[in-house]
Image (cartoon, grey):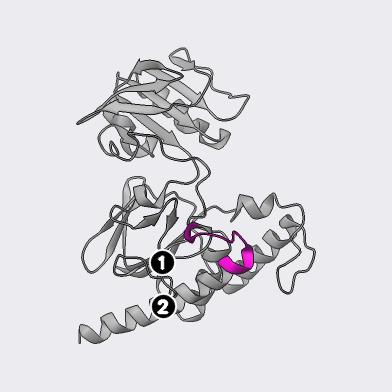
Amino acid sequence: MHDLMIIGSGPAGVSAALTAQARNLDFLWFGSPELSMKIQRAERIRNYPGLPDVAGETMQQVFLRQIEDAGITLTPERINAIYPMGAYYAASVNKKVYEAKAILLATGIQTTKTIPGEAELLGKGVSYCATCDGFLYKQKKVAVICTSPKFEPEIEYLADIASQVTLFTTYKGCGIQKGNVTSVAGYPSKILGTDHVQALVCQGQETSVDGVFFLKDSVSPAVLLKGLEMDDSHIQVDRMQKTNLEGCYAAGDCTGRPYQYAKAVGEGNVALHSILEYLAACASSNK
């Protein structure tokens, strides 16, 4: 049982992790080794205090050095689902489960919105993890929606298990060459099914499938953690970065505009201090 899990490695996650380390919390931090593609791809950043007119790659390297100097470990794994367990949270990561007393969502803003049926059929044929759920579809038909070439090994893994893979990619030049993989142009608009996935709809055409795998960098927080109150695509928080769920906090772009690094860093710091107060209150009540 850890004190805290931080989900996301953008500026809000970096800020929270640095403060958590300084305050000697036992925490896990999940995210990308590159931290944030948004920062990495930024041409110039002119409004961040202390780093005037800086290139995104330079800011990224500054953050990485600071994390390394602080001795912080970043776990480069994607969270598949988060479950409230009463006094703590459990997070599913591939075939492992981690537990913590509090959780901080710093997931950024999702660029690919969920489609009808995606959230409703999660765990009923919809999955975000090929490693976790691929074995369920041995010699069955699956669809894969992939947003980045880095997930292609997972597509190949599914192709070795399933009888047929219908592949949708949001990028050009997919390197998958398997006889049972069929690439389809466009992006699916709907998943059909009641108790389980039955078909996928794209450009008005239905494709019968037994399962649908979404391989993408970010998943809607409302899908990751059921019961989380949202305002459109943003997590609802108060001034202390608290969500409607006890022990759950959020910071950064996922809480709304402005989508700026300085705002995200400030919210990450506020959230961490709120979490410190929450953990102290929990410890007092358990005495």
Q: Is residue 134 above or below residue 79?
A: above
Quarter holding the C terminus is: bottom left
The residue sitting at 53% across, 58% down in the picture is: 253
Q: Does residue 12 appear left or right of residue 46 in this picture? A: left
Q: For mark 1, give the secondary structure.
A: loop
Residue 170's image quarter?
A: top right
The percent coordinates of residue 269 (x first, y second) are: 52, 75
Quarter holding the N terminus is: bottom left
Q: Which residues lie in the magenta part?
A: 254-264
Q: Which of 118 and 164 is in front in this view?
A: 118
Q: Looking at the image, is mark 1 or mark 2 earlier in the sequence?
A: 1
* Amino acid residing under circle 2: Ser
The residue sitting at 38% across, 39% down in the picture is: 129
Could you say which disc has been placed on residue 22 in the image? none
* Amino acid residing under circle 1: Val
The percent coordinates of residue 180 (x first, y second) are: 43, 14
Mark 1 packing: few (<14 Cα in 10 Å), some, or many (20+)? many
Residue that label 1 marks: 237
Q: In this view, does 273 lie above or below 226?
A: below
The percent coordinates of residue 60 (x first, y second) are: 67, 59
Q: Does the magenta stretch include residue 260?
A: yes
Q: In this view, does 203 lie above or below 10?
A: above
Between circles 1 and 2, the one closer to the viewer is 1
Residue that label 2 marks: 274
Q: Which of 117 and 147 is in front in this view?
A: 117
The percent coordinates of residue 89 (x first, y second) are: 29, 62
Q: How far apart are marks 1 and 2 (CA)?
A: 12 Å
Q: Nearer the viewer, residue 239 or 61?
A: 239
